[in-house]
Image (cartoon, rainbow, N blue to C red):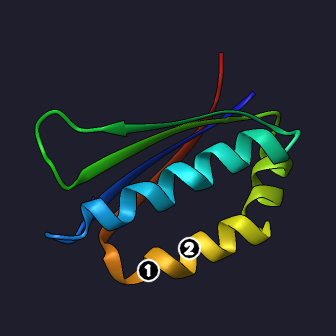
Amino acid sequence: MFAVFVDFRIKPGMIDTFLPLMKDNAVTSVEEEPGCQRFDVVLSGDDPNLVLLYEIYDNPDAFAAHMKTVHFLSFDEAVADMIADKVVRTGFVN
């Protein structure tokens, strides 16, 4: 299994617009992508503008396919101006 961790720092005042789009992307990923096994959206308890993702895919190819889906590309375009910073980390589940 291939894990993806993403930290989104959202611009002040944008979290209420960002979150529904992020949650829709997560739900659609799990429901429509056979290679996406888990997609959790986590709100930081310390920082109201920090959103953390935990995603599990069958393998790196399934994640690469995710990045090309219509729903991901639409989400990515819609939130681009809301994001102050983004860090993506990947690894394999042991």
Quadrant assignment, res 90: top right
Residue 16's spot in the image, x, y percent? 28, 60
**Left of 78 or right of it: where is 92?**
right
Q: Nearer the viewer, residue 68 or 1?
A: 68
| 65 in relation to 29, above or below | below
Residue bearing mark 2: 76
Q: Residue at x 32, y 76 (%)?
A: 82
Nearest to the observer: residue 77 or residue 63 = 77
Position of 19 compared to 27: left or right? Answer: left
Q: Which mark is residue 52?
A: none
In the depicted view, which residue is nearer to us: 88 or 74?
74
Q: Which residue is mark 1?
A: 80
Kind of residue at disc 2: Asp
Rendered image quadrant of residue 68: bottom right
Residue 71 rendering spot, x and y as whole percentages: 71, 66
Q: Residue 85 at x, y = what percent?
A: 30, 68
How far apart are the two marked residues, 1 and 2, measured between alpha carbons?
6 Å
Q: Quadrant of the N terminus?
A: top right
Circle 1 sits in a helix, a strand or a loop, which is it?
helix
Q: Is residue 89 above or below residue 20?
A: above
Please rate how many residues cluster around mark 1, counting C-alpha atoms within 10 Å: few if below 14, some from 14 to 19, many from 20: few
SS at badge 2? helix
**Would you say the residues marked 1 and 2 are in contact, meaning their CB atoms lie under 8 Å apart?**
yes
Q: Residue at x 65, y 15 (%)?
A: 94
- Name the residue located 44 percent from the left edge and 75 percent from the top edge: 79
